[in-house]
Image: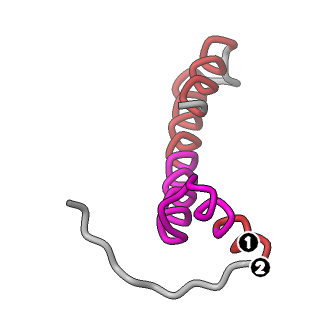
């Protein structure tokens, strides 16, 4: 089991409304779970962004169509 810690965050009211709505509809188990999922998705995107920058550095130029297709597949997982 992954260790968790309690923190206090301030978020825009409309984001909280969306989170609570998703909890009420059964899309998320709790507001905490909803926020965690959003934060994890951001972390994955930032990691992927670093990987894409590395690919561009290694290939010496802009991404190829094949590299872009791979990136799109990773983002839609």
Say if 8 sits above or below 31 in the image: below
Residue found 31% across the figure and 73% down from its top: 4
Is residue 33 rendered magenta in the image?
yes
Task: Give the residue number, with chain letter if any, for mark 1.
Answer: 17
CA distance separating discs 2 and 1 = 6 Å
Task: Give the camera-side residue of 5 and 56.
Answer: 5
Residue found 75% across the figure and 78% down from its top: 12
Say if 14 sits above or below 73 in the image: below
Nearer to us of marks 2 and 1 is 1
Residue 50 in the image, given as x and y percentages of width and height: 53, 43
Range of magenta residues: 20-46
Residue found 63% across the figure and 57% down from its top: 25
Residue 43 in the image, given as x and y percentages of width and height: 51, 54
State whether the magenta stretch is mostly helix, strand or loop: helix
Say if 53 sits above or below 15 in the image: above
Residue 6 relative to residue 21: left or right: left
CB under 8 Å between discs 2 and 1: yes
Q: Secondary structure at mark 1?
A: helix
In the rendered view of the protein, which quadrant contains the N terminus? bottom left
- Circle number at residue 13: 2
């Amino acid at each position: 089991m992954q260790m968790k810690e309690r923190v206090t965050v301030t978020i825009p009211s409309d984001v909280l409304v969306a989170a609570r709505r998703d909890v009420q509809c059964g899309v998320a188990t709790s507001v905490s779970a909803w926020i965690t999922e959003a934060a994890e998705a951001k972390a994955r995107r930032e990691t992927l962004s670093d990987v894409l920058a590395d690919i561009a550095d290694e290939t010496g130029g802009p991404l190829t169509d094949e590299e872009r297709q791979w990136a799109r597949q990773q983002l839609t997982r």
